[in-house]
Amino acid sequence: MARIIKNDEIIESNLTVASGDDIDIAQDNQLLPLTVYLANREALAGSNNYGVWLDSDEEVELLEGKIDCNVIGLNFPAFNDGRAYSSADILRRKLSYKGEIRAIGDVRRDQLEQMIRCGFDAFELAPGQDLEESLASLQGFSENYQVTTDKPEPLFKRR
Amino acid sequence: MYTYDTYDQKMVDERVDQYRDQTERFLAGKIPADEFQQLRLRNGLYVQRLAPMLRIAVPYGMLTSTQLRKVAHITRHFDKGYAHFTTRQNIQLNWPLLEEVPDILAELATVQMHAIQTSGSCVRNVTTDQYAGSAQDEIEDSRPWAELLRQWSTFHPEFNWLPRKFKIAVTGAREDRAAIQVHDIGIRIIDQGGEIGFQILVGGGLGRTPVIGSVIKEFLPKKHLLSYVEAVLRVYNRYGRRDNKYKARIKILVRAMTPEVFAEKTEIEWASLKDGPSTLTDDDIASAKACFSQPNHETLSDEEPSDSLIAGNKAYQAWLTHNVQPHRVPGYAIVNFAIKSTGVAPGDVTDVQLERIADFAEKYSFSELRVTHEQNITLADVRQKDLFQLWQGLVTAQLASPNLGLLTDMICCPGGDFCSLANAKSIPVAEAIQRRFDDLDYLHDLGEFHINISGCMNACGHHHVGNIGILGVDKKGAEFYQVSVGGSADSSTAIAQILGPSFARQDVPDVIETIVNLFVDERSEEEAFLDTFRRIGIQKFKDAVYPSNG
Ligand code: SF4
């Protein structure tokens, strides 16, 4: 079980991030690494509650047409590794993925609003981050210039 | 001049609140130092050798008199009474207190200023031609495009954690005064058979591996500017190296992929963004341009400076020749002045001088001024008939030195006096050279001459593109200087070539003098230094500077 932030509140999630060599795909409630997921899609069809996670150097395009689950985790190996922001935006706007995108890894409070704007909607924060206090950082700026998942038109068309 | 609407103002105000909260949490021990470093950098705050340094954004170099007066006020109340103009068309404060920075930002916000994204691995201040809107050789004013890019890049959530910093420059003139070939993205406005569009360069840059940018798009229709730039940034964000900060700039990626492959990758990303909601309609472009309407120029005609003023006034004559440029509108002129005088670090200006400059801009140039990447000030709309009076005022304010573009008008980074990354000091080197070449007549005879000085490989002083470049290096703990020759930052951008082993600080003025003397011997008539260099080649300079080797 992990405490995560989703829909502006703290909830318990029974999904855990599976990694390493000895992953038992028969187990429920796992976020599987991309390669494991892609290699076992048929076997997974009968499983309950699973998802896939990608590291920051893995291309989300590999999932195109192959998304059978409702949770995709995107890993931040370090808080200043910004690749997952592009991955999330591509999942939402290019691959039209509507399920959950969960930030995992070195996820820090002051970046939550940027993640939300790129399409993340669930956050498993890094150890040591105070979840209750972090709720205050979900609300970003009241306006933004760019087109993002949450703002389909740029500000210059709304002025 | 672009003026904030309620949206822009609100975002800047909210950033002040957000940063204040982050600072308070850091001081309360709730944000670790390595993380706060990244957060404060994205708001322009460095921690330097002696004190924090705050870099204030000046979008595309434009300021109003009101803004400059506010900066003067801030230097007086929060700093030591002076500001520093940088080579990125920004302003730096060298002595703010970390605890007071939120208050400084709140003051700045009252005059539509901020420090957003002036450092850190994100998209930095977009720079452009300091004569934009007034230049005679302009195809189109670059500022509306720079402003559209400023808005697009400000708090762009996808690109706040890039592999490294990212700099964009735009030029709309035939002569490139924005050095677009040495930027991460260089944008040149071009006219293709009556249609205006952009030529896009990527991967230029200075730093430890200087590179001239490669053209990846010969003609981009203007409506696609934002989506195309977004595609470039996406390729960089995804594939730029993150394992080694010295290999993380886009130039390394472009080189590793080859410009052709980089262009293809960009096209692939662009395919899903092109014609999307960021596409600029004619109305969008017209509104952006309306924000940069021309000031109310009077209907005047060009006038020759009257003989009585010039006769016997050599100083004024020299100033007219070197500091005044032609203007698009009859009866007007562009006036530059160097904020570099001997004994003062290039780019440093006192609070009182800042207020005087604000007064000059208000009185003579529609209350607007520009800061240039040569660390000078431009008044872009001065009536020709006011030139003499303005000059007299500048003389009194000690801002009339007619050394613009001359050897003593050096570009110089803060160096070891202020910067914690420095290998060596740079300001005392500039000062020693200025003292050596103190004969203005001689400087004028030498003609256009650029000496650029950086205190380390990071090249904030753009030493690679100086006619003479000076780079501080560390030799077994001692400060030495490597000298290179033949660089240029204009349309024919060239990277300077290293002469040979480095020199001790006290020898640098002699070395420069040797180079200048060789040039004087070899030049034909009025030839500029760079032309002589290109004609005779580097070997002669090597022989002159290291005689024992020859
Ligand atoms: S070139 Fe080096 S020494 Fe000079 S300001 Fe930049 S980082 Fe500091």
Image (cartoon, rainbow, N blue to C red):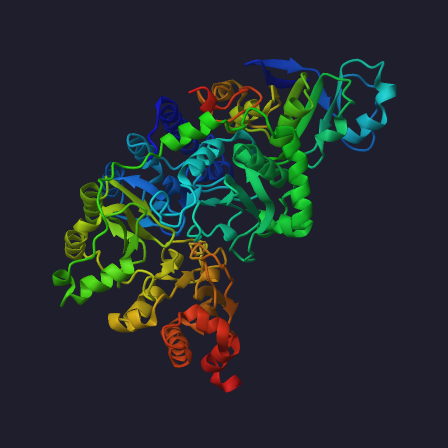
Please tell me whether residue B49 is drawn above or below residue A74 in the rendered image. Answer: below
Query: Which of B519 and B297 lies nearest the eye of the viewer?
Result: B297
Could you tell me if residue A81 is visible in this image?
A: no
**Residue B429, x across and y down, in percent:** 36, 66
**Residue B513, x across and y down, in percent:** 37, 76
Please tell me whether residue A80 is drawn above or below residue B324 in the rendered image. Answer: above
**Residue B99, x across and y down, in percent:** 34, 36
Question: Which residue is rendered at x = 64% and y = 23% of the image?
Answer: A93
Q: Is residue B189 left or right of residue B20?
A: right
Residue furthest toward the left?
B308
Quadrant occupied by the N terminus of chain B: top left
Please tell me whether residue A41 is drawn above or below residue B363 in the rendered image. Answer: above
Query: Which of B381 and A60 lies nearest the eye of the viewer?
Result: B381
**Residue B414, x across and y down, in percent:** 37, 55
Could you tell me if residue B290 is visible in this image?
A: yes
> How many labels sit on residues?
0
Q: In which of the image's four quarters is ligand 1 placed? A: bottom left
Query: Which of B33 and B329 lies nearest the eye of the viewer?
Result: B329
Q: Is residue B94 left or right of residue A142?
A: left
Question: Which residue is rendered at x = 49% and y = 50% of the image?
Answer: B180
Q: In this view, does B47 lie to the left or right of B366?
A: right
Q: In which quarter of the image is residue A89?
A: top right
Q: Is residue B413 left or right of residue B221?
A: left
Query: Which of B523 and B273 lies nearest the eye of the viewer?
Result: B523
